[in-house]
Image: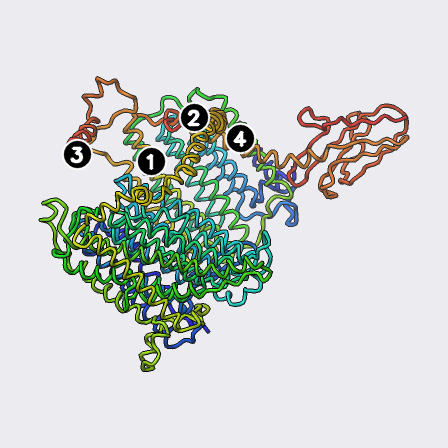
Amino acid sequence: MIAVATSDLASLLMQVAQVQPVPASSLTPAGWTPAWAFWILSALVVVGAISTIAQRSLISAVMSLVATFFGLAGLYATLSAHFLAAIQVLVYAGAIMVLFVFVIMVLNRDEVERVSDRGLLDKAIGAGALVYLAVRLGEVIASPVGPVSRMSKPAPEFGTVAKIGEYFFTEFLFPFEAISILLIIAVIGAVVVARTVVSRPTTGYEVPNAAGRAGEGGDDHADGDAHGAHGGH
Amino acid sequence: MQLLVQNLLSVGLHHYLILAVVLFGIGTFGVFMRRNALTTLMSIELILNGGNLTLLAFARSHQDMRGQALALLVIAVAAAEAAIGLAIVVGVFRNRHNTNIDELNLLRY
Amino acid sequence: MTENFPLYLIILLPLLGAALNLLFGRRFGNTFVSLVACSAVAGAALVATKAVLLVASELPARGALVDQLVSGDWIVAGDFKLQAGLMLDRLSSVMVMVITWIALLIHIYATGYMEHEPDFARFFGYLNLFTGAMLILVLGDSLPVTFVGWEGVGLASYLLIGFWYHEDKNATAGRKAFIVNRIGDFGFLLGICLLFTVVGTVKYADFGSIAGRLMTPWWMGWPAGYWIAILLFVGCCGKSAQIPLYVWLPDAMAGPTPVSALIHAATMVTAGVYVVARCHTIFDTFPEAAKMTVAGVGALTALFAATIGIVQRDFKKVLAYSTVSQLGFMFVGVGTGAYTAGVFHLMTHAFFKAGLFLGAGSVMHAMGGEGDIVKMGGLGKHMPVTRWTFFIYCLAIAGIVPFAGFFSKDAILAGAFAAEFRMSTQMTGAQAHLVALYPKLLWGMLATAALCTAFYMWRLYFVVFTGKFRGTEEQEHHLHESPLSMTLPLVLLAVGSVLAGLIGVPAVMTHGLPESLEHVLTFFTGWLSPAMVPASPEPHEHWLEWALMGGALTISLVGIGLAAALYRGGISQTAENLKDKLGFVHKLLWNKYYIDELYDFLLVRPLRRVSVVLWKVVDNIFIDGGLTKVGPFFVDVFGAVAQRFQNGDVQRYIIAVMVGTAGILFGSTYWLAYQGIQGEVKVERRTVTLKLGDARMRPGQLIYAIDWDGDGKFDDTNVRFNSELKHEYGSAGQYKIVVEARDPVWNMVKRSDDWFFGASTPLSAKVE
């Protein structure tokens, strides 16, 4: 049964391909990439993305995201952005995702409830707006006045490290330096935000009752103030 | 039918752009539906990659390497964002023992 | 003839000193502060001396050194453009030399006088600030720049009078000085504005050619020049303490003594005299009623203040009234056209009056702050330097030959006696007589004032320095000569008081002397006139000049003699008897003619009452009760609504962003098609004209499909937008028309019979 269906589909596709040869001068442009590569990779990306936001288990979500990023890396490669594809794998699928996994391991909690039932109406409205936005954008992209795809073959050096490096040392010098500062700030900021303050035990944001508060370590601070005030007098 | 087949077999700028829109939409949907802060961060990564895809597609279409350079900068910003975002999640978790963003609503009137 | 010179340095140095001392002085200690303050002023003095030497040696009589204060235009308002520059000519040279060098001496003096003051840095900061502002005043090349300095010295004066603000009395005195000066400054500013309106220039360099324009009739039959002069003179009255705005100066003695010496005796208060001399073209406007006013006010003030000075008991108060009186002398000088004499007296007065104040400071320093002369006496034994320098100053101010005061005061008296005011030619005989008599009257008043001056100064000297000490035992034990930093300026000023007059000896005394000596002795007259100011009026006959001189000297000697008779060796019984006998006069003078009380009754109290009404009624009821509630009400309402949106739910924020973005996209793409289906129908027999869209649309921007008969099928499709579409109906009847518009760019389709934002007026045609 399956074999029949498969062979039918294959023959159908072959028929379609034979009957409808794609004219070079038609409305839609001739392809940049092997179409099968695009469709497989984009399927991977879309499924991975949906899986990312749908999984209950965080680890599964991260793994879906890694798959998505690999698919995107492939898509970048089809766009002659080979260096970017490599960076995508290294930075995203490698570094950032490992960071995510670390944090998930540290927190070690799976989500009990994916979507809270609060504000469901808001979310429905948001989803509607989002769908409208996506459809509208798709329409515009697909319409005859949408962006024009130029079909010329890229130059041999297009997408090479050398060319990107050239841009970073000429036209993009300032953003490049700014990004390096941003990364340093991010590193330091992450350390500052996430470090454990040993001397002051954590307390909840819940306002504790007065009796409970007196015994808590958080009052060290208040004691210090009181001493300071005495010193002043 | 002819149009469909043509679009199936010949992939150009439009396909990449629509894929980017889809990616962006899924990411945004994740941001406002899911309550876990980590999932939210992952969704933001999806949004950023949707943007990156458009940059690269246009770069390819216009034969302009600046789009790729810009995409690299976006990746760097995304890395910084992930680092800070995760640090905040860890810090919040340490204080509140959960990471549900719909409960992190102290910053209001 | 002008030449560039970095004059800004003269101003910058004291201002830098002020900034350093005020910002950092407290941290670095007194040595640093005094070093900074004194070296700043010393630097300014050296640069100024260099500049003045240049003026004297290199430039012609009317020449000036110029510099920019603000590069480019300073004030721009429409067509009105004003540059701010600096100018040093012969007139400002006199002022600059007096200011910088006397300021330097007083700075040095103050390092000793203020040594125990905790707020040392603030004091010197203010003092430097004053010096800088005063130099702007005299170096400004136009009235507005001078006005900047004018206000600057007013501020510094206010700050220094209220320097010991912990005592309410001092702060009140500072406020009084400030407010009274504001009245004058308002007049001054109006004068500048009127001058600009009438003449179109406010630069001193242009004043040589404005006399004609000043004659423009302005108001009440008087020329514009008269009103400008009067308005400027109101400002001068405020700053230079003339009637009726003199009341602040005696109270200003609440400030530290070096301040009284520098600001309220030697420099700032003479600014009015400087301005009158500087603007002499305006004051000389025919008819010379403005000059008569100036001279009259000056003479009245001189006499008035001198009489008050006779009975005062406070050391500094006596000197304050003496200052007011001497300023009156200067105004008579410039008012009678004897500009040289007025400025000369300004200069000599700066020496001896600064010295007198510093002497007073030295005495009060020794007395532990005591200022009542009745509690002093016999101090000469304990403080010889102060005593003998004070002796010289008293000789100078009393006008004893050959000390400084003699020559300058004599020049003013001679000028007043010989002055002729040019008034209208159509005066009646009696009026002409009065005008001719007026200078003699001025002379008489000044002579009386000079008598009083000699009397009260020597009364002061005898009461303080001779006789027996009348204070407490403790005070007597404490008496001591002041340190070198205080005595040195006293000695130098004394030298100045002896010598300063010798450069302005009247020509009649120098006849027959060697030419080089004669040149030195009459130097000052030639320095200013005729290049800077018109020559002073002089008596025509030599004997008259000699007689006037002799008369002035006699008057002074009589004053000194009287003082000696009554007060030598302490306050004599005769003096006490005299005081009892003339009780009424004494009381009147002691209470300063009750002027303060009069002002209080006429001005201060009514103002206070009005203020209370404004406060209780307008402020409390209208503003606090109503007006201030309106704004908060709207803020409250808006805030109550707006705060709902900031609920801390981040997810809702991003939903809002999405909805907003979708709304913008929808609105922007929907708008064109929506506009395209709005239309109106015109029926003409069987022909229907359909007008669609609005005037801004271009042909072909929309593509229509039109159903003319409402049967659900489009009759015409692919119709490009045009301003009018026509259709011919085959038969009569009521037809419903449906239009579908497609926007090819945004791929947006809109039908006119949509339930959702369709055509606002349904399209239909009734055909007969």
Chain that bears disc 3? A
C294 vs C666, nearest the viewer: C294
Residues at discs 4 and 2 in contact (Cβ within 8 Å)? no
Task: Look at label 4 and name its amino acid.
Answer: Val
Q: Of the residues shown, which amino acid type is indicated by label 3?
A: Gly
Q: Are marks 3 and 1 on the same chain?
A: no
**For discs 3 and 1, the disc positioned in front in the rendered view:** 3
Against B99, residue C253 (above or below) is below
Identify the residue under disc 1.
B86
Q: Nearer the viewer, residue C476 or C301?
A: C301
Q: Are labels 2 and 1 assigned to the same chain?
A: no
**Disc 4 versus disc 2: nearer the observer:** 2
Marks 4 and 2 on same chain: yes
- Res C308 visible: yes
Residue C647 bears which disc, if any?
2
Which residue does the numbered mark 4 point to in the structure image?
A: C659
- As measured in the structure, the alpha-carbon distance from the residue carrying label 3 to the one carrying label 2 is 42 Å
Measure how far apart labels 2 and 1 are at the Cα level.
24 Å
Among the two numbered marks 4 and 2 on one chain, the one whose residue lies closer to the N terminus: 2
**Chain for numbered disc 1:** B
Report the Cα–Cα distance between label 3 and label 4. 57 Å
Displayed quadrant of residue A96: top left
Residue B14 position, x and y percent, is: 57, 43
**Residue type at mark 2?**
Asn
Disc 3 designates what residue? A232
